[in-house]
């Protein structure tokens, strides 16, 4: 499309065409940029014409008949302006049959499928040289020789197909989904680390508080140890004083053997406690046995199983009972007694 537009331009626009071909790559050049550059060139030409007319009016130069070349140039500018206007209208009406959008053909659509192919084109490179008007008017009217150079260029038009684009999009979508999963995992880890950091800070604060309390308690313990050492020294001294004192039962003196007849205060009270315990136990046993009576001998204080008379005077063979089977109902186990009626007590 770009090459077609450049071919449609008149000969006056050839310097501009050559400049565009040398400066930019026609394969990648969009039509909008080309039209913009052409419009700016046209506006600059119109400005120059207006400035020249203003200068002519100021100098009051008599207008002479224009030559045929000037008329041709003016006509070419007007034709170019008409071509640009019609081309703009034409582009506004164009609809792509691939994406249903305005402003480009199906061949220029990025979604269009095309196979890879190699094109060989002939590029024309022409140079124009304008000679300087130095000698005479005849030399100015003469045309300079045109030099045309031919070159063969092999252009590899490697265009990406729609299927390849779809595959690339799918691959990138897979990569994006994996990255999103990683981002979620990292966010979760970040939250866990933040919570762990908060707990660590709280633990550090608690540790600092406990360390301060520990220091204060150590100071208190040292003070208490000092006071306790004072009290312990006093108690030891008291024990020594009490140990030096004589007991009530200590009768050591003249004419008394101390080694054989030693009576200690502590041993005396221990023995007394033992005697009292034995008495209490005996009294308890007596009270307990006073309620028990033997069914064999009729005495109190023991049971028939522990009776002395029963175990020694009666042999175990005599106490054995023989068991004989008797049919049911032959022996009356509970015979009825005589009938007793109540009567008033006789007064004697």
Image (spheres, grey):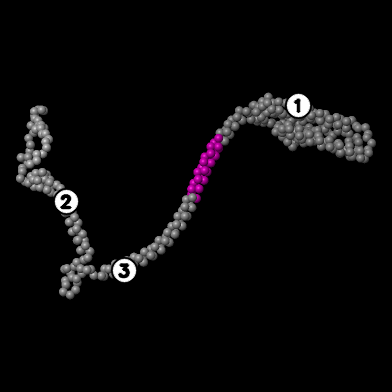
Q: Return the disc, 1 or 3, that comes first in the chain's sequence.
A: 1
Residue 178 versus residue 252 in the image, above or below: above
Q: Quadrant of residue 282?
A: bottom left
The C terminus - image quarter: top left
Question: Is 17 situated left or right of 236 in this image?
Answer: right
Give the overall secondary structure of the magenta segment.
helix
Q: Return the disc, 2 or 3, that comes first in the chain's sequence.
A: 3
- Residue displayed at 33% across by 67% down: 234
Q: Which residue is mark 3?
A: 237
Q: Which residue is mark 2?
A: 287
Q: Residues within 10 Å of mark 2 (few under 14, many from 20)?
A: few
Asked if residue 185 is among those painted magenta in the image, a careful observer would answer yes
Check if mark 1's residue and mark 3's residue have beta carbons within 8 Å.
no
The magenta segment is 177-201
Label 2: element kind: helix
Question: Is 245 situated left or right of 22 in this image?
Answer: left
Question: Is 45 situated left or right of 107 in this image?
Answer: right
Q: Which one is nearer the viewer's eye here, 336 or 274?
A: 336
Q: Position of residue 158 (x, y in %)?
A: 65, 30
For marks 2 and 1, give the CA distance: 137 Å
For marks 2 and 3, give the CA distance: 50 Å
Q: Which one is nearer the viewer's eye here, 83 or 263?
A: 263
Label 1: element kind: helix
């Amino acid at each position: 499309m770009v090459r077609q537009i450049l071919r449609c331009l008149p000969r006056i626009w050839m310097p501009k065409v050559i400049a565009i071909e040398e400066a930019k790559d026609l394969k990648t050049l969009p039509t909008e940029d080309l039209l913009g550059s052409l419009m700016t060139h046209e506006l600059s030409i119109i400005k120059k014409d207006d400035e020249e007319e203003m200068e002519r009016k100021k100098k009051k130069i008599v207008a002479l008949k224009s030559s045929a070349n000037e008329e041709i140039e003016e006509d070419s500018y007007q034709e170019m302006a008409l071509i640009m206007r019609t081309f703009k209208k034409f582009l506004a009406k164009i609809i792509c049959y691939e994406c249903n959008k305005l402003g480009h053909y199906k061949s220029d659509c990025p979604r269009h499928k095309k196979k890879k192919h190699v094109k060989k084109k002939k590029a024309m490179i022409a140079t124009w040289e304008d000679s300087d008007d130095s000698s005479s008017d005849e030399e100015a009217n003469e045309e300079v020789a045109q030099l045309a150079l031919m070159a063969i260029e092999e252009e590899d038009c490697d265009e990406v197909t729609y299927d390849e684009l779809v595959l690339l999009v799918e691959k990138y979508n897979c990569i994006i989904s994996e990255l999103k999963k990683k981002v979620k995992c990292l966010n979760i880890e970040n939250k866990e680390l933040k919570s762990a950091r908060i707990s660590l800070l709280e633990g550090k604060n608690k540790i600092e508080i406990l360390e301060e309390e520990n220091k204060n308690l150590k100071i208190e313990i040292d003070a208490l140890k000092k006071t306790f050492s004072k009290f312990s020294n006093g108690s030891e001294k008291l024990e020594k004083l009490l140990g030096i004192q004589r007991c009530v039962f200590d009768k050591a003196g003249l004419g008394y053997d101390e080694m054989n007849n030693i009576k200690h205060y502590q041993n005396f009270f221990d023995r007394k406690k033992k005697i009292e315990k034995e008495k209490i136990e005996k009294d308890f046993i007596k009270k307990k046995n006073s309620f028990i009576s033997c069914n064999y001998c009729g005495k109190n204080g023991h049971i028939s199983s522990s009776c002395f008379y029963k175990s020694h005077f009666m042999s175990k063979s005599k106490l054995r009972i023989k068991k004989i089977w008797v049919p049911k109902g032959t022996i009356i186990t509970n015979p009825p007694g005589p009938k007793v009626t109540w009567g008033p007590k006789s007064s004697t």
